Amino acid sequence: MTIREMLEAHPQPAGGDLEARARCIEACSDCAASCTSCADADLGEGDVQMLVRCIALCTDCADVCQVTARIVTRQTAPEVATVRATVGACIVACRASREECERHAHHHEHCRICAEVCTRCELACAEFLASLPG
Amino acid sequence: MTIREMLEAHPQPAGGDLEARARCIEACSDCAASCTSCADADLGEGDVQMLVRCIALCTDCADVCQVTARIVTRQTAPEVATVRATVGACIVACRASREECERHAHHHEHCRICAEVCTRCELACAEFLASLPG
Amino acid sequence: MTIREMLEAHPQPAGGDLEARARCIEACSDCAASCTSCADADLGEGDVQMLVRCIALCTDCADVCQVTARIVTRQTAPEVATVRATVGACIVACRASREECERHAHHHEHCRICAEVCTRCELACAEFLASLPG
Amino acid sequence: MTIREMLEAHPQPAGGDLEARARCIEACSDCAASCTSCADADLGEGDVQMLVRCIALCTDCADVCQVTARIVTRQTAPEVATVRATVGACIVACRASREECERHAHHHEHCRICAEVCTRCELACAEFLASLPG
């Protein structure tokens, strides 16, 4: 992704660590894509009835990750309380999705990969939050 | 909107008050539309330089409201922690957008209307949160 | 929804019929909500295996409708080719979702309602397209 | 991104070239992020009044790219007409955004980068469309 170069080209970079911000955006984008794909792969499995909660949680997680990527990308005149609350919600959604995917990781490769991507997103979000001033 | 009928037709209605859920979804959808429109109207004003923060906050708020409407709509096997965190983030985003719109309400009718819609969304989200069990 | 008042308060209203624009946005918002809810209700049904394509098409339709509502809402310096192509894609997505929902309308009330909402969205999109200049 | 591995782990891969599909999703995700960032960077520039159309077109393009990434990601029981129409709309939105960004590329590095990312997305979408059967 070219998001790092884009953040650097911004006329008024926001507070916090630009590297942590870029990693958070990349992790959220990747997690949105993986969760979208995992919910869709679940839907194509023969045992879809067993995967209902995985579809539900991955669908929610994809939505929250996608919006979090957008909010964290925006550096002009942001409201830090909104950024904190959104990234916090993203960590919660990723954790729920990851825990459910882990339960199916031995049967479904897409769940195994998706759980790893969710874990990376939780960490990248937490590191970005920690990098924010005040 | 037909969301109330849709929620009632669900085979496994989620916990909490269905009326409060429907009002929350409607308020989030309306706020997403108003904030999208307010950011766009700001962009068309002659004094756009004065409205930069209004554009930024309304754009974020539209994104968060739209995702919150989706998360609250879904009743199958939800993770209540994700629902709470997302609706909580929505209240924060609406408050920020509302406070900024109020500063421009005397000059711009779209900011005046948008501030009202944000207020209704904050209330509907808070009432839905209060209706959730546990 | 308050979108009509918001469109009227815009400093530079776009071309075309404002009423048709407002109806298109409202229909797309309603269809996004109904399709999100229908996919979720399908997921909670005992015969989810029979509803896989309905979940897939309603999920796609919800996404396309939500973005179409945003694009049609924005009146500042728009690119009419983008508006036309997006609204056109929305009609295609609504038709696919509606045809699949109709197949399940006798068994599932949420599919019956959702098919009606999709039909209204197809019509509102077509009327908005017809109202655009050039 | 891990989208390629996710697509390969799908139980029922969709028709067309998996490599072209993965490149299309990656290009749309990257373009959504760049256009979100470019609109936000424009908003922070001193000459924001000159960048109004760039903000408008990049905001639309980010929305269309994000939804296109989702639609192309989903392989279970898709409607190919919806896929074609959405990817087609994405090419139109990217072209509009790219042409406007090119006008500002000499003054603003974020516009220069964003124009390149839009170009790559147009190409990846066209190649994916060409790879679809029928």
Image (cartoon, coloured by chain):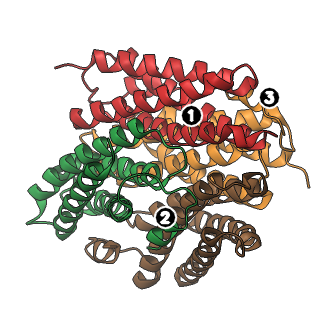
Chain colours: A orange, B brown, C green, D red
Query: Within 10 Å of the Cα at label 1, are there few (<14), some (14-19), or many (20+) other Cα atoms?
Result: many
- Dot 1 or dot 3: first in sequence order is 3
Give residue B91's position: percent from left, percent from top: 65, 71
Mark 1 lies on residue: A30
Visible residue check, residue D1: no
Whole-number angstrom distance, CA of label 1 to CA of label 3:
21 Å
Three-letter amino acid code at the position of disc 2: Leu
Does mark 3 fall on the same chain as mark 1?
yes
Report the chain holding disc 1: A
Mark 2 lies on residue: C7
Q: Which residue shows up at 80% across the image and 31% down it? A: A19
> In front: A83, or D65?
D65
Give residue B51's position: percent from left, percent from top: 74, 57
Query: Within 10 Å of the Cα at label 3, are there few (<14), some (14-19), or many (20+) other Cα atoms?
Result: some
Three-letter amino acid code at the position of disc 3: Glu
Q: Which residue shows up at 67% across the image and 34% down it? A: D38
Between label 1 and label 2, give the one nearer the viewer.
2
Which quadrant of the rendered structure holds the N terminus of chain C?
Answer: bottom left
Q: Are marks 1 and 3 in contact (CB under 8 Å)?
A: no
Mark 3 lies on residue: A8
Query: Within 10 Å of the Cα at label 2, are there few (<14), some (14-19), or many (20+) other Cα atoms?
Result: many
Q: Which residue shows up at 58% across the image and 22% down it? A: D117
Does mark 2 fall on the same chain as mark 1?
no
In the displayed structure, A134 sits above or below A5; it is below
Whole-number angstrom distance, CA of label 1 to CA of label 2:
36 Å
